[in-house]
């Protein structure tokens, strides 16, 4: 651990896009707090790999839809690393379901994790960032938050909410020297595609002008840019690495 280094907290940081983000920030010299909830084995495995390479990483188990657990996590981050410079709200779930079949439980689960979780993490982190007069929040949305997806209406709503929060919050906290941006990934090769068969994936590739699926590293590279001084005049924006799928 180096308290002179910048610190990033990555929610859902042990799998898929979150894992790539955690690795990219660790390699860039950040202290990285990797949040997980159910993916304990993946989190421990990632921690071992990064720790053996000498990177400054810690794990924290927290359900981000629980305010108390979020507050404990951010307190831990500040205590362990001496601060919090970048919050990446990445944790999220998806579900394919006809709109007319969505249950109250499906809806609440989607909004609690994808939207309320980002609200809790951002609000708690901002109590520290505002007092420090610096900080950076990066919210992971989706192209479906921009254009909507058939049979994923509740998911699309939650991701559109992330974009609305990004834009409004960016205006509110900019005077405190805090930037807030959103990344809206296109079709990315992660576990979220597990429900798709080969033919369905081929169709998604064909619908992407660059003729390939995105990789988690494509999103991680965007995040490291938004966290850096190279993007110091960018706030309230939605950047969508999607291979031209949505323009």
Image (cartoon, grey):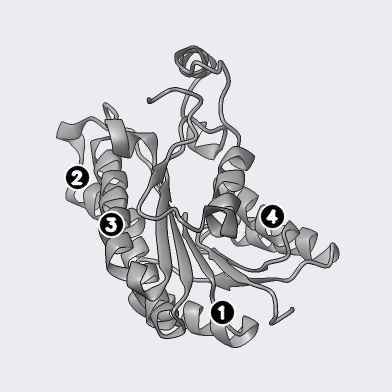
Q: Earlier in the sequence, mark 1 or mark 2?
A: 1
Q: Nearer the viewer, residue 210 or 58?
A: 210
The residue where tag 3 is placed is 165
Query: Horizontal and vertical percent for residue 119?
Result: 31, 65
Tag in front: 3 or 4: 3
User: Gap between marks 2 and 3, in whole Å?
Assistant: 25 Å
Q: Earlier in the sequence, mark 2 or mark 3?
A: 2
Q: Nearer the viewer, residue 69 or 218?
A: 218
Disc 2 target residue: 103
Q: Residues within 10 Å of mark 4 (few under 14, many from 20)?
A: many
Q: Position of residue 100 (x, y in %)?
A: 15, 33
Residue 23's disc number: 4
Can see residue 228?
Answer: no
CB under 8 Å between discs 4 and 1: no
Callout 2 crowding tier (Cα within 10 Å): few <14, some 14–19, many ≥20 = few
Looking at the rendered image, the quarter that the C terminus falls into is top left
Asked if labels 4 and 3 touch by Cβ distance under 8 angstroms, the answer is no
What distance separates the C-alpha of mark 3 from that of mark 4?
A: 26 Å
Residue drawn at 70 percent across, 80 percent down: 4
Name the mark nearer the viewer: 4 or 2: 4
The mark nearer the N terminus, 4 or 1, is: 4
Q: Is residue 133 above or below residue 150?
A: below
SS at circle 1 = helix
Mark 1 sits on what residue? 77
- At horizontal 74% and vertical 71% (from top left) the residue drawn is 56
Q: Are marks 3 and 1 in contact (CB under 8 Å)?
A: no
C-alpha distance separating marks 4 and 1? 17 Å
Label whose residue precedes the other's in the sequence (4 or 2)? 4
């Amino acid at each position: 651990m180096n308290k002179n280094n910048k610190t990033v907290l990555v929610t859902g940081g042990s799998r898929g896009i979150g894992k790539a983000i955690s690795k990219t920030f660790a390699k860039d010299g950040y202290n990285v707090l990797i949040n997980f909830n159910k993916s304990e084995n993946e989190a421990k495995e990632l921690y071992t790999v990064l720790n053996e390479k000498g990177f400054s990483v810690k794990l924290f188990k927290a359900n981000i839809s629980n305010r108390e657990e979020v507050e404990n996590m951010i307190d831990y981050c500040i205590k362990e690393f001496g601060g919090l410079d970048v919050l990446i709200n990445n944790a999220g779930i998806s579900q394919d379901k006809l709109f007319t079949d969505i249950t109250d439980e499906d809806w609440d689960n989607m909004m609690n994790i994808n939207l309320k979780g980002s609200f809790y993490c951002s609000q708690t982190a901002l109590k520290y960032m505002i007092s420090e007069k610096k900080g950076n929040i990066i919210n992971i949305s989706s192209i479906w938050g921009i254009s909507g997806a058939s049979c994923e209406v509740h998911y699309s709503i939650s991701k559109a909410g992330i974009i609305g929060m990004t834009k409004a919050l960016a205006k509110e906290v900019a005077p405190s020297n805090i930037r807030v941006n959103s990344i809206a990934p296109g079709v990315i090769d992660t576990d979220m595609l597990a429900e798709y068969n080969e033919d369905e994936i081929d169709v998604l590739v064909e619908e992407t002008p660059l003729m390939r699926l995105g990789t988690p590293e494509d999103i991680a590279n965007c995040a490291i840019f938004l966290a850096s001084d190279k993007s110091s005049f960018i706030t309230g924006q939605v950047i969508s690495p999607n291979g031209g799928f949505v323009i």
